[in-house]
Amino acid sequence: MDQIVLIVTSLLAFYLAWNLGANDVANSMGTSVGSKAVTLKQALLIAGILEFTGAVLFGQSVSEKLVTGIINPAQFAPQVLLIGMISVLAAAGIWLNIATLFGFPVSSSHATVGAIAGVGYLAFGKTAVNWSAIGLISITWVITPFVSGIIAANFYCFIKRWILDRPHQLQEWIPWLSALLISIFGVIVFPTIAKPIQTLIHLPIASISLLLGAIGIGTLSVYGLRNLQTVELTIAKYQVVSACFVAFAHGSNDVGNAIAPFAAIVYILQTGNLPQEEFKIPVWTLILGGIGIVAGLAVLGKKVISTIGEGIISLQPSGGLCAELATATTILIASRMGLPVSTSHALVGGVVGVGFIQGTKGIQFQTIRSIGLTWLVTLPISALLSSVLFLILRTVFI
């Protein structure tokens, strides 16, 4: 019986990861495709490799915290929690699938959190749910897009004034652009990469990160100055690099949305006990999630990429780069403050911020309204779906 449950839940985890790849990963690459910095095929290849690498190598810590942060597993009997996590996988996967088919970028984090909260509430009432965590997530619905939009608008104003309007100064700005890009994304990515390197060369993580940053700035400067072309074509080179950082960071963080509930199921099946805080995530579950993410991106990712890259404003590489830099900056600030934020919300806010500087006539407000509505309903719909599924499964199997 346990083997059958493992096979079924493996398929459900793959299904959720598939839809996460089609929606969440796709929107992180949308600005690069929309600005023509990369083609759709190139974006799928870049995201596929880097999302998978980030998920498998560095996805464990996020996955460990997701299950125990929203509900207290100790309140559940092992079989009840197992059924609850099956309901979470199915509910979050179904909602992401629906949103993707309509091309709307939603937060996989909010879908999974909502589904877990729905199970906890139905099983043990309101005291079983960490409402302070839910409250923080709700606040970020409003704050994240606005903060990212303001940052993107300021980035774009700066680039427009000093580079776009003064193309003859482009060569002078290449090293500074390189430093800006490496500084923002490097703070997010380099400490993660530095951990395995530290075991080999025994230097502090901060020193390794600075070394990686210096190498990155030098390499990027040479890369940007080689075959210097028009301003937008040169900036497009930098957007390709930022897209790589986004994909890697996203894979290492968001694979937990698909794998955390599944890892809890695997733990219960293997031990018969409840997962405790900091329980270990098997590597093979991360690989399953990484494969699912890549497959979903390749098959269904085009719809959400089109919405982000073309459905809000008409993007150039300069605008796309500013939106990605603003997204990374917003996520970095939120992480330092301990606030849970959504890549989807930050990226859409960044694109809109660039659009306001370019002129509001080019903004598709109908698309923004539709996206906003799906953001508002993601958590409650996921909670409702998981509650209904949990009620059915508990009635049938317990």
Image (cartoon, rainbow, N blue to C red):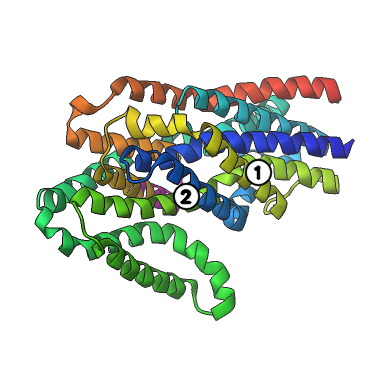
Q: Decide: is 192 above or below 243.
A: below
Considering depth in this image, is 356 or 165 the residue closer to the camera?
A: 165
361 left or right of 368 in image: left
Where is residue 235 drawn, in percent x and y?
26, 52
Q: Which residue is mark 1?
A: 259
**Residue furthest right in the image:** 1
Q: Which residue is mark 2?
A: 46
* Residue name at image x 29 percent, y 22 percent: 365
Q: Is the magenta region chiefly helix, strand or loop?
A: helix
Q: Is residue 131 visible?
A: no
Q: Which residues are magenta?
A: 330-340
* Residue name at image x 49 percent, y 47 percent: 45
Quadrant of the snapshot with the N terminus:
top right
Which of the 4 quarters of the picture holds residue 394?
A: top right
Where is residue 304 drawn, in percent x and y?
44, 31
Q: Real-space Cα distance between discs 1 and 2?
A: 22 Å
Secondary structure of residue under mark 2: helix
* Residue name at image x 70 percent, y 48 percent: 285
Residue type marked 2: Ile
Residue type marked 1: Ile
Considering depth in this image, is 112 or 217 the residue closer to the camera?
A: 217
Considering depth in this image, is 29 or 252 the residue closer to the camera?
A: 29
| Label whose residue precedes the other's in the sequence (1 or 2) | 2
398 left or right of 152 in image: right
Magenta-colored stretch includes residue 338: yes
* Residue name at image x 43 percent, y 50 percent: 246
Label 1 crowd (10 A; few <14 / some 14-19 / many >=20): many
Magenta-colored stretch includes residue 109: no
Where is residue 21 drawn, in percent x and y?
54, 38
Q: Are marks 1 and 2 in contact (CB under 8 Å)?
A: no
108 left or right of 167 in image: right
Secondary structure of residue under mark 1: helix
